[in-house]
Image: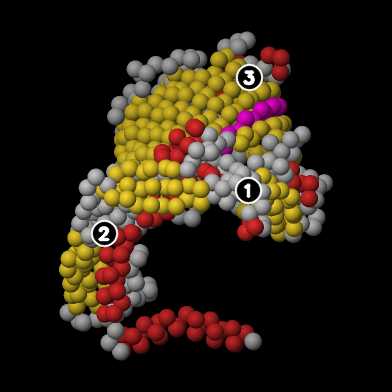
Amino acid sequence: MLRTVRVCLVLTLLLPLISACKQEETGAVRVSDISLEGVKAVSRGQLKSVLATRESAALPWGEKHYFQREQFEADLKRIEAFYNDKGYPNARVKSYDVKLSDDQKSVKLTVVVDEGEPLLVERIVLHGFDPLPDNHERAIPGELALQPGKPLDRALLQASRETCLDELRDHGYPYSTVRVAEEPGSTDQYRVIELNAEPGPVAVFGPIEITGNSSVDDSIIRRQLWFRPGQVFQQSRLRDSQRRLYALELFQFVNVEPVGIEQKPLEVPTRVTVTEGKHRRVNFLVGYGSEEKARGQIDWRHVNFFGGARTATVLARYSSLDRGVRLGFTQPYLFDPRYHLSLSGQSWYSDEPAYQLTTTGGRATVTRRFRTRGDPVMRGSRPTMTLAFTYANEWEDYTITEEALADPTFRDELIALGLDPNTGSDSGRLSALGVDFARTTTTNLLDARQGYVATLHAEQAGRWLGGDFDYVEMTAEGRYYRSLGEVAVLAFRARAGAIDAHGGSPDEVVPFFKRYFLGGATNLRGWGRYEVSPLSEGLPIGGLTFMNFSTEVRFPIVGRLGGVIFLDGGNVWENSWDFNLRDMRYDMGPGLRFNTPVGPFRLDVGFQLNPIEGLLVDGEEQKRPMRVHFSIGHAF
């Protein structure tokens, strides 16, 4: 049996090579390059993707593609058909060239395209949308993928029709239809597009059928649904309900769909189909390291803890460097499906060469999720909006070794951990209440191309809450993304915040880990992390007020490789609410992005436009007014 498996594996690896060799022996000619000239209205990569003739890989072991005359001639017709669908009915292949290499083993293809004049949309006329609320009807033209003045792209026209259907189906008209009519415009180059709607009858949600669940009670599934029998039918509530069920982490598969719609019932039945996954998961880790010595870790997770879709987590770890326990609990349904409760607690000890740190305490968070109407910018997508209240009660006790205090290379690491590299030790209890508001319209935070993100944070520590610290903190952040045509993206972010100390000096009532620093891969990229703040003897010591903005243009280069041009600005000031816009630090520079499944790999080179005089880096005066940053994911 083992020999058979090995033979199959060898054959699997050798078959592509054998096939390529046979084609070489029979005189097949590889396609080494395809050059498209005259292409301006569409991207060359998009046009190449519709061709059956493909370029061979440059690497010797890469996939080879061979030239076939009949296939290439069909591709010439595909090019014209592709342009016609994009709104260029007069596009033609002007000429082409097939150039054989000197050894007659490969060929280079050149295709010259004459795009011609596009067929433009003069205006879009809507009929039959009167049953919609006035503000929704007025918003439809701005939500359409196809816009006046643009080429008559058939794919965008179909997407615009679907947008109209979605709007009707989201207002109680599940059986609506939208017909597209194309009329002559003011000249031969223009067309008037008519979208004619027939809403049909108003329908409501009917009975709900649930199938596929065994250990999860029907009531758990029903309370996650955004609709109830008797409510006006809204298609978006089906999608939102499906997302909410997936968020429970109880199911491997979820589908929420209307049934029996062929008969067009006025009470639309729905079926919820689920497939349950494993509710208990345990991971063990045992090992040995030269620094940690023997180490062990247990990570336990239960996604249906005592039923009710509650989640409980336990992480226990022991080594010579760190040890402790972290607990977590989530109640997804707190009196109402829109509220959920999260509890976390830890007792953790870290013994590093530079410091010893003990953190004990916990946090409780109640989150309210709001259901909002789709943002016009996002063409029908539904924004997310949350409001969270958090109470934190934590004790922190740390001591930094004398060697670490004297070594400037440890400074950034200590600050990242919230430890004061100036005093060497501190302890205290933080008792604080925080409020967080967030609204998001972008659908992909890892690679946003449209929409915005807005967040607000307010935090009160001390006073009637007790504890050793007494302050009020306010921060705000806004991000905005806009596509520039079909290729580039404009991204902008602005942040600001301040801490107001009460009951004593900031050094006494504001913990060091709450102080603000700028610089690094995600804000002022011309500096290293924690290098921008008020200085004491050349060293950044943090401040109580900050403001920062970043703007960048993201654009493709070739394949999965893209580029960025960015400009950053901001500063940190010593006193509370001491914004000084005339005292800002700026940097700019280029960057590269390579898309991967976990997000873009990022390389940025930031150049300081106004360096900080007297800044010490690793104990020496700053020598170079630029920084290079590597990371995964966009800066914002």
- The residue identified by callout 2 is 89
Quarter holding the C terminus?
top left
- In depth, the one of 498 and 458 nearer the eye is 458
User: CA–CA distance between discs 2 and 3?
Assistant: 64 Å
Determine whether 636 is above or below 278 in the image.
Answer: above
Residue lying at the far right of the rendered structure: 306
Tag 3: residue type? Answer: Gln
Labels 2, 1: front one = 2
- Residue 386 lies in the magenta-colored region: yes
- In depth, the one of 404 and 138 nearer the eye is 138
Labels 2, 3: front one = 2
User: CA–CA distance between discs 2 and 1?
Assistant: 40 Å
Element type where label 3 sits in the image: strand
Tag 1: residue type? Answer: Leu
- The residue identified by callout 3 is 460
Mark 2 vs 3, N-terminal side: 2
Is residue 150 visible from the viewing direction of this image?
no
Q: Quadrant of residue 369?
A: top right
Element type where label 1 sits in the image: helix
User: Which contiguous range is marked in magenta?
Assistant: 384-395
Labels 3, 1: front one = 1
Tag 2: residue type? Answer: Pro
